[in-house]
Image (cartoon, grey):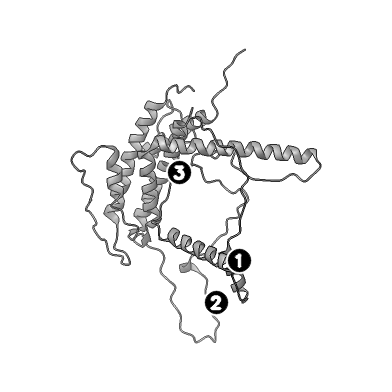
Amino acid sequence: MEFGDASTTIERYRQALKHILLMLVGMAEMGFCKAGAGEPGAGGQLTFFPQKGATAQNEVRAEKSKLSPALTLPRHLYRAILLLLRPAESAARRLIIAAAQGIVVTLPPFRPRKLKPKISDTVAAMRRLGLAVTLSREDFARYEAERKAAERRASRPRRLNLSLLDALKYPFRIRRKYVPAHAVPRIRSIDDDAPRIPLPPPPSQNDPINAAKLTLRLNALGEALDDLPGQAQRFARWKARNDAALTRDRAARDAAAAGGKPVPVRFRRFSPLRRGRPPGGRLPRFDPDAPKRKNIREVDEILAHANAMAHYALEPPRRNTS
């Protein structure tokens, strides 16, 4: 499969993902409920009005800025948005990888990091044991600086960037079977005169679900689509650092094996993409000649093509020189 210059395809799919994001934001805006109450807030009203002179790149930013993380969504709408948001995130991640093809990053010389223990952690551990802590002036000043830095980090507005790596599946995960609260067995004896406590009702489709994480993911996706070249630079830096770390680990293993010492084991990602079907997608591979099925959405086709482009960018096919 030859893609050639994929910039036109990447831009077309970027615009398509922006339209899907606008639809998701509109769904969330219409279904938001008041915080702490299960009543619909501004249901049926879309508060997105494009301003005069606004460019297409600012439409997503103007729309996502109206989402409040303090609101909730009904369960059925929350799941409907996630059903489209997950493949859209996967497609955007693969477009970033495809756009990063050919970007060369020069890393500074590697310097081993010197870990300096924090005084605040030591003080907290000693206080948990009930021990008195006495600090010198220098240590107390360092302790106060660490405490103020932690307070500043906690006061910053929370921000979520689009992940450049697919979440891996744990192959040895044991799926436990849980009984829902409304179906748990109740054991009673014949002589039991205690009043029968009713079980909680089963979950409803209209139950309010906290949408704070969902709004952060929508914001992250919109920012990534608005700044695709910057995200490509970000991925190129990660890939350069990861490749350099893999080279250092390989050299350390060879040196340890030559000296008869135990080989250090360090787990790192070899590829940002996981094997098999992309997360959230319904198509295992891109095939433009295959007949379209009924359950295939537009985002599935975009994801399948973007997945092929990302694999091509990571491992371009070798040319036959024979």
State how many labels appear. Answer: 3
**Residue at (22%, 54%) from the top-left corner?**
44
| Residue for badge 2 | 187
| Side (left or right) of 133 relative to 162 | right
Q: Residue furthest top?
A: 322
Q: What is the number of the mark on residue 280?
A: 3
Q: Are marks 1 and 2 in contact (CB under 8 Å)?
A: no
Vertical placement of 133 versus 255: above or below?
Answer: below
Secondary structure beneath dot 3 equals loop
**Mark 1: few, some, or many residues within 10 Å (few <14, many ≥20)?**
few
Q: Are marks 3 and 1 in contact (CB under 8 Å)?
A: no
Q: What is the number of the mark on residue 122?
A: 1
**Mark 2: few, some, or many residues within 10 Å (few <14, many ≥20)?**
few
Which mark sits nearer the N-terminus, 2 or 3? 2
Q: Quadrant of residue 189?
A: bottom right
- Camera-nearest label, 2 or 3: 3
Asked whether residue 169 appears in the rendered view, the answer is: yes
Q: Amino acid at mark 1?
A: Thr
Q: Amino acid at mark 2?
A: Ile
| Side (left or right) of 309 relative to 74 | right
As measured in the structure, the alpha-carbon distance from the residue carrying label 2 to the one carrying label 3 is 42 Å
Vertical placement of 125 versus 115: above or below?
Answer: below
Where residue 230 appears, as percent x and y from the top left, is: 41, 37
Q: Are marks 2 and 3 in contact (CB under 8 Å)?
A: no
Q: Residue furthest right?
A: 260
The one of 287 and 244 positioned closer to us in this rendering: 244
As measured in the structure, the alpha-carbon distance from the residue carrying label 3 to the one carrying label 1 is 44 Å
Where residue 140 appears, as percent x and y from the top left, is: 55, 67
Q: Residue furthest front?
A: 137
Which mark sits nearer the N-terminus, 3 or 1? 1
